[in-house]
Amino acid sequence: MAKPKNEYINREISWLHFNDRVLQESADQNVPLIERLRFLGIFSNNLDEFFKVRYATVKRIVDAGKTGKSVLGGEVAKVLLEEITRIAIKQQAKSQDILKKIQKELARENIFFINETQVREHQAAYIKEYFLREVNPKLTTIILNNLREFPLLKDTAAYLAVRMVLNKETGTFLRKRNEVQYALIEIPKGIDRFVVLPEKEGKHYIIILDDVIRFCLDSIFTMFDYQDISAHMIKITRDAELDIDNDLSKSFIEKISSSVEGRKVSDPVRFVYDKRIKIDTLRFLKNKMDIEETDSVIPGGRYHNRRDYMGFPSLGKTDLLYDKIKPLPIKGLSLEGSIFERIAQKDYLQYAPYQTFSYVIKFLKEAALDPFVRSIRITVYRLAKDSQVAAALINAAKNGKEVTVQIELQARFDEQANIEYANKLQEEGIRLIFGVPGLKVHSKICLVEREEGDSIKRYGFVSTGNFNESTAKIYTDYTLFTAHDGILKELDKVFGFFETSYKINKYKHLIVSPHYTKNKFIQLIENEIASAIVGKEAYIKIKMNSFTSYRMVDKLYEASRAGVKVQLIIRGICCLIPGVPDMSENIEAISVVDKFLEHPRVFIFGNEGDTKVYISSADWMTRNLDYRVEVGCPIYDEDVKQELIDTFEISWKDNVKARVFTKEQDNAYRIAEGPEVRSQFATYDYYLEKLKQ
C-alpha cells in the first residue's frame, strides 16, 4: 500500500495566520487594555513587513511570467497573490472592529478618542496652537493637478489625500467653479501620533495627529476658496528586496548603501486607502501612481500606519499595562567579580528577559579591561540604538585589544543602522569583516582569547538571539557562556571561515550552516527513527520561530510514521500539518504568543535515554539551512541541559496562550487538563524558585 502523499501549508498563508494570532492578543480580554492597543500596532507593523518582503517576492515571480509552483509549495503565484489580498482585507476589517471595541472599553476607563468633528470649544484653542507650533512647520503639502510627474511617495509614510471643490476662480490659478483640486499632505514623523489633550475632570482625551491636521485644513489651504474639502488617508508599501549591483569599484558598504537608497524608488506592491474616499479621488490617485493589477489594493479604515499603536502612551495607567518584571540574576554567576573565573569552572545559561541581559555586557566589558585578554571576535546582526555592546567593543579597541567584528550589512530593515555602526566601529580602529559572498551571517557568537600562564585560554558565548539590550527586554532568547575548549576551538574555525570561505571546516561539536546543519539534524532524526523501529522510546522536541523547509518537514513525517513522538513549539510559520493519520499522527504542534516574543531555537532528541540538547541561531527554513552562516551548539553541562528541558516542558504545558496547529489553521486555543499554565509567567516563577534552592 502506497504511503499517503505529504501535504504542506503554504508559507505565506501560514505567516498570515501567525499574524492573526497576534491579532487575537488584541482581542483577548485577559490582556491589559493598553497592551491590546499595542498588539494592534504589532499586527499592523508585521503586515507592512510581510508585504514589503514576502508579497513583493511572489509579485516578482508573477511579473517574470512564471508560476512559482516549485518554490511556493505547489501554489500558483498569481492565485496566491489574490488569496493573500483576500485574507489581508478580512484581517484588516477584523482589526478595525477590535479597535472600536477597545476604544469603547477605554472610554469606561475615562480615556476618550476624539476626531476633528468632536473637538470641544475648550480643546480647539489648544489644538490650533499645537498645530501652529509643532505640526505646521513640519508639514509637506503638494498640490497635484498641475504636476508633470506624480511625487514619489515614501514607503514608511502615510498621506492625507485632500479633495477640494472650488467655489470660483481662485487667484492666479484661474480655477473654474466646481473644479476639483487634489493635494497630498504627508503625516510628519518626529511628532507623536497620539496628541494627549489637557485632562479635564479626571478624563483623558486623545486626538490622533491626522485629525489635528484635518481640524486645521483651513490654515493650510487659505489661498483656495472652496465650497467643500475632505481628507482621506492613503499609504503604499514598496518592494523591500535589495538589488545589489556588481560594480567592482564599489566597496560592500557602498553597494548596500546604494541598495537601501534604491528601496525609496522600488515598485509599490500594496496600496491601502480609506474606503470612504471619493471614487474620483481614488481613480485619480491610482492612475497617477500606476497601480498595477498584481498590486494588492486594500480598502481600509480612516487611519493607516497603525503600527504607531505600538507606542501608545501609558497615560499613567499602570493597571492597564502588563506588570513589569525585574530580570533575575543567574544562580551562581555574579555580576561582581570576574565572570571569566566563574565560566572557567562551568557553563552558565542566560534566558532573557527572565534573566538580565547584563551578563553579556559584563562579559564584554571585562574583556575590554582585562590586561590578559588579547582578542575579541563577535558577530553582529542587530544592535540597539545606543548599543552598550558596541561601546564595550570600542572600549576594548582603545585598550589595545585586537577586536574583530563580523557585521551583517544585509540584516533586513537594519541595513542603514548597521552601515552607520560599521563606519563608527571602523573609525575606532576595530577590524570589520563583512561575511561571505552569497551568504548572510546570522550566527550569534563571541570568542575571547586570554593569556593564562604560557597558553591561551578561550572564553565565549553562543546565543539564539541578537546581542541587543533593547530587544532582550521583550524577546526570549538563550545565551550559553562556556569555556569548553572543543566548542571554542570550533568557534575559531567559524570566524576563520568568514575570511577564507573556500576552506570548508569539519566540526565535531558545532552544527554549522550552510554545510552541515541540514544533514546533522537529519542524522539526529534518523537515530530516533531507528530507535522507534526496534521498539525503543524515541522522541523529538523542538522550539523554533518558523518551520518552512519541506525537506525537514518530510523527515518529521517519516519519523511520525515510524512511531517517533514529536512535539513542536513554533511561534510563526509552520508548513507542517500535524495530527494527520498515516502522515503526522505522532506529531503535535503549538504556537505560544504572549507578552514576550518567543525567539529561541532549541532541539531535544531522546537518543535512547542519553538526551541530546542543542541551541541554535537557525530555524528550519531553507534560507537558514542553505544560504546563511548559522551556528548550533551542543549542551554538555548537565545542569544547563536540564534547564533547557525544563523550560521547554513549561512552554509545552501552556494551556492559556498556546494555539494548536491544524490543517484548518483556525488558531484555536489549546485545551489541556490540569491547572492553568501560562508558560511565560511560569518560566519566570521557575527561575525565581531556582534562586531559592
Image (cartoon, rainbow, N blue to C red):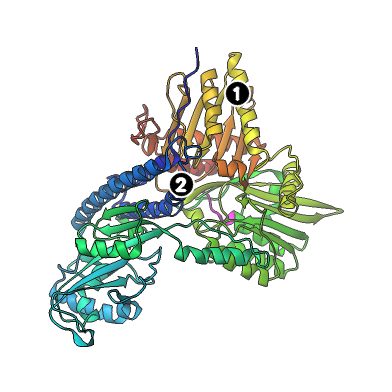
686 sits left or right of 290 in the view: right
Q: Does residue 321 lie above or below 187 as drawn?
A: above
Residue drawn where x is 65% and y is 43% of the image: 514
Magenta stretch holds residue 212: no
| Quadrant position of residue 253 | bottom right
Residue drawn where x is 27% and y is 73% of the image: 183
The residue that label 2 is drawn on is: 65
Q: Amino acid at mark 1?
A: Glu
Front residue of 177 and 244: 177
Q: Position of residue 323 (x, y in %)?
A: 38, 52
Q: Position of residue 502 (x, y in %)?
A: 75, 48
Residue drawn where x is 61% and y is 19% of the image: 531
Q: Which residues are magenta?
A: 355-359
Q: Can you see residue 20?
A: no
- Quarter occupied by the C terminus: top right
Q: Residue furthest front?
A: 65
Using the numbered discs, state the Cα–Cα distance from disc 1 to disc 2 in whole angstroms: 43 Å
Q: Main secondary structure of the magenta part?
A: loop
Secondary structure under tag 1 reads helix
524 sits left or right of 18 in the view: right
Front residue of 669 and 321: 669
Q: Position of residue 269 (x, y in %)?
A: 39, 55
Magenta stretch holds residue 356: yes
The residue that label 1 is drawn on is: 528
Q: Position of residue 527 (x, y in %)?
A: 63, 24
Front residue of 675 and 220: 220
Q: Amino acid at mark 2?
A: Gly
Categorize mark 1 by other alpha carbons within 10 Å: few (<14), some (14-19), many (20+). many
